[in-house]
């Protein structure tokens, strides 16, 4: 937080002076350069240089004259890193927004829900070169106006591509598919994640239905006043739901086929318990040899992915390897992990991160990492991911337990563990497979306007 006297009876100004904002900008850029472990592959894929892109926002930060100008200049600065894990938040006594709907606030778990128009949108991924959006749901009482499947041509008078380019700096994302997904979700909302100039009293969207083009003006309504059909939520013809957990929903064949479908939610704190319950269910129902379809289109990341993959893969696989960027935050990080270890639980955002007691991780931090830090190395040595499933001196190979022929995964942008799941192998018999021979196949489907 930056404050300075604003000249009005000595009242501190949350936005500080131009000199303070310049110092703040320099601090952020320097610490980012010193600490961030940027991905060369991602940067090359996106055609970006985060530090160069961040530098372009210097003038906007330094010249900001209001809370609103500074907040959105800092939002653009933060998002230039192209890492959806990173965000800015409001702090007590700091910059304030007239309407902070959708913006995180330090010291509060609650975010004010944004008003929204009575439509939901989704991206059509069938043309990777150009974003296309379609209406994916319409709230009850509004079905006679927009319809599911209508293609969006413009937003508030701007073509979709132009509008996306305008809002892109305000969206946290790591991949282009994730940018499109978040943009589609954001456009119908009146959220403080976008500056006020992007909004009118109503949302104006131009739609196309067959050969008909028309423009609608839709009001922003309280989210709790809207009832949705959820028509695009995953449905599996020929399967019925058996049980649901915080990790997955389990579906079985109506025709007793040796296949199960897991609607995957993420790799969260209950994963080990939920996966154990799945294995126990499979043992009771003679399903340990069934093939598995994992639908990850609604999934996010998390921890303990290898534990799940062991039970969904039929062949050995290697967990991903990782390292640490050496900087001034490493010593406090080691101290934090040591405190967690001594409490008997090494966490990642509240999720138990290791399958052992954390001793593999602490051994590495206290030896290899500490020596790399003392030697002034840029990075530590590479070890099995977070030392959560294998110690540092192993190959990272983990044996799969599943007896089924294959697992199939559909994904959008669901995090590192799902990408690792993809990398376990592919189905050579399925056209378009991109992951080689093995047990896992990824099915990418273009969005049908009426059904996912």
Image: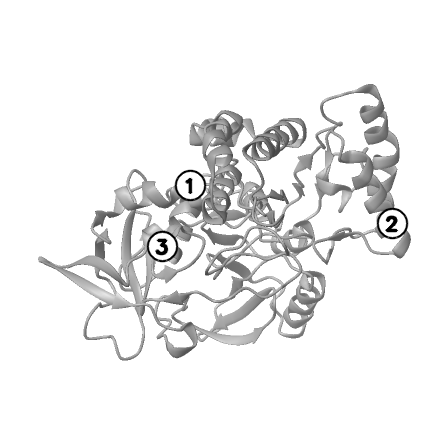
Q: Which residue is mark 3?
A: 184
Q: Position of residue 142 (x, y in %)?
A: 25, 75
Give the distance between the C-alpha atoms of the residues marked 1 and 2, in whole angstroms.
38 Å
The quarter of the rendered structure image containing the C terminus is: bottom left
Question: In the picture shown, does residue 236 fall above or below 31?
Answer: below
Q: Which residue is mark 2?
A: 339
Indicate the position of residue 83 as horizontal and vertical percent values. Answer: 54, 41
Q: Is residue 212 left or right of residue 180?
A: left
- Label located before the other in sequence (1 or 3): 1
Q: Nearer the viewer, residue 364 or 349?
A: 349
Give the distance between the C-alpha atoms of the residues marked 3 and 2, in whole angstroms: 42 Å
* Among the 4 quarters of the image, the one containing residue 1: top right
Q: Position of residue 7 (x, y in %)?
A: 57, 44
User: Tag 3's secondary structure?
Assistant: helix
Describe the element under mark 1 as helix, strand or loop: helix
Tell me if I can see residue 394 in this picture.
Answer: no
Tag 1 residue: 169
Rendered view: 103 above or below 139: above
């Amino acid at each position: 937080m930056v404050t300075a006297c604003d000249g009005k009876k000595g009242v501190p100004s949350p936005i500080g002076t131009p000199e303070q904002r310049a110092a703040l900008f320099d601090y952020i850029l320097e610490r980012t350069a010193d600490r961030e472990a940027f991905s060369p592959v991602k940067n090359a894929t996106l055609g970006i240089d985060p530090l160069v892109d961040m530098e372009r926002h210097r003038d906007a930060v330094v010249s900001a004259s209001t809370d609103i100008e500074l907040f959105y200049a800092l939002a653009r600065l933060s998002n230039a890193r192209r890492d959806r894990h990173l965000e800015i938040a409001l702090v007590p006594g700091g910059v304030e927004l007239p309407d902070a709907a959708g913006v995180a606030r330090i010291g509060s778990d609650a975010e004010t829900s944004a008003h929204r128009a009575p439509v939901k949108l989704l991206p059509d991924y069938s043309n990777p070169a150009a974003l296309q959006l379609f209406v994916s749901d319409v709230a009850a009482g509004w079905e006679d106006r927009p319809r599911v499947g209508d293609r969006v041509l413009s937003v508030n008078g701007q073509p979709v591509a132009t509008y996306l380019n305008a809002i892109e700096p305000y969206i946290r994302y790591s991949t282009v598919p994730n940018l499109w997904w978040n943009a589609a979700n954001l456009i119908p909302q009146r959220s403080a994640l976008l500056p006020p100039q992007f909004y009118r009293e109503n949302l104006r969207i131009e739609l196309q239905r067959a050969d008909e083009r028309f423009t609608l003006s839709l009001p922003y309504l309280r989210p709790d006043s809207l009832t949705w059909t959820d028509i695009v939520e995953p449905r599996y013809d020929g399967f019925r739901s058996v049980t649901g957990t915080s990790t997955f929903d389990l579906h079985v064949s109506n025709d007793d086929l040796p296949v199960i479908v897991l609607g995957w939610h993420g790799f969260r704190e209950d994963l080990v318990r939920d996966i154990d319950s799945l294995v126990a269910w499979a043992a009771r129902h003679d399903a340990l040899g069934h093939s598995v379809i994992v639908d990850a289109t609604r999934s996010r990341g998390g921890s303990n992915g290898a534990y799940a993959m062991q039970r969904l893969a039929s062949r050995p696989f290697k967990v991903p390897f990782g390292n640490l960027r050496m900087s001034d935050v490493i010593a406090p990080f080691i101290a934090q992990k040591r405190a967690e270890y001594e409490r008997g639980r090494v966490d990642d955002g509240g999720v138990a991160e290791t399958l052992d007691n954390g001793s593999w991780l602490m051994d590495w931090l206290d030896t290899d990492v500490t020596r790399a830090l003392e030697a002034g190395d840029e990075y530590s040595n590479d070890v099995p991911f977070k030392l959560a499933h294998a110690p540092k001196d192993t190959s990272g190979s983990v044996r799969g337990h599943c007896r089924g022929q294959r697992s199939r995964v559909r994904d959008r942008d669901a995090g590192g563990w799902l990408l690792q799941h993809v990398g376990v192998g592919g189905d050579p018999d399925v056209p378009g497979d991109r992951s080689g021979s093995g047990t896992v196949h990824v099915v990418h489907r273009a969005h049908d306007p009426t059904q996912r």
